[in-house]
Image (cartoon, rainbow, N blue to C red):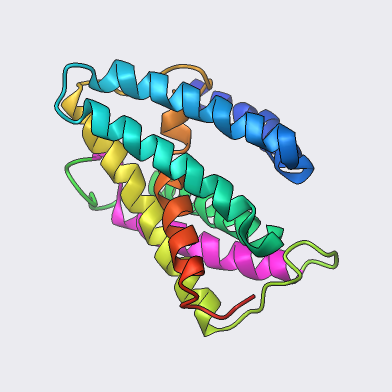
Amino acid sequence: MNIELLKRILSSIILLPVTFLIIMKGSFLFNFFIIFCLVICSYEWHLMSRKKKYHMPGFFFLILTFYLTYLLFNFKGNFDLFLIVILICISTDLGGYAFGKLFKGPKLTKISPKKTYSGMIGGYLLTVINIFIFINLPFALLSSIKINYDLLIFTLLISTISQIGDIIISYFKRLSNIKDTGNIIPGHGGLLDRVDGMIFAFPISYIILKINIFQFY
């Protein structure tokens, strides 16, 4: 097995349970967690974009997106909505990575050479499958979420936004001529590399849920 892939798998095995534990605990621990993530992402953005015209706008965007993430976490007291957005983002990333590695094929965009059409389709496919599986698990997780066409459209929309976010951060990395935004997470790079799709998906999810377009909860 490729060393970088092994590092990626081991990092995920350690980080995902810890992250979910912090999220499940909520309250002060979660607030501290998102502030910590904001500080790290801001630092990585500073290193990547200093002396660029978009340096300060990037900071404002990060502050806004983490604030809206906080609001999403507390939205209507329905913790399932926050969990389902996380599930969509993680599934999209894993599906894109696995299918892209397995099937390869035509490149999706020159901005991010590793992105392929097979990875894009794999991201959608794994996301839809995981949403269905988790909602039908025999315990209370995501119990307030209803499977309907609204949920399917919301899932595909947020998955698309997550993939676009990934490409946008890749674009800024190319402008800065770097491969990763940092090296804090073995196999993944920087924290900004890890949450690139989420920092777009979370705020837009909150806005969509706030205007009450979809009825699946």
Q: x and y percent of residue 2 in the render?
A: 49, 26
Q: Is the magenta region chiefly helix, strand or loop? A: helix
Say which of 4 and 63 sits in front.
63
Query: Residue visible at 42% across and 30% down?
Result: 192
Magenta stretch contains residue 37: no
Q: x and y percent of residue 118 in the render?
A: 35, 56
Which corner quadrant of the image does residue 139 belong to? bottom right
Q: x and y percent of residue 103 in the render?
A: 38, 52
Determine the residue located farthest toward the right in the rendered image: 139
Query: Residue visible at 34% across and 47% down?
Result: 165
Say which of 40 and 171 sits in front.
40
Query: Residue visible at 55% across and 57% down?
Result: 85
Q: Is residue 118 above or below residue 129?
A: above
Question: Magenta residues, as a range?
Answer: 112-136
Query: Residue visible at 25% across and 28% down?
Result: 56
- Asked if residue 207 lies left or right of residue 22, the reply is left
Identify the image quadrant of the N terminus: top right
- Asked if residue 120 lies left or right of residue 176, the reply is right
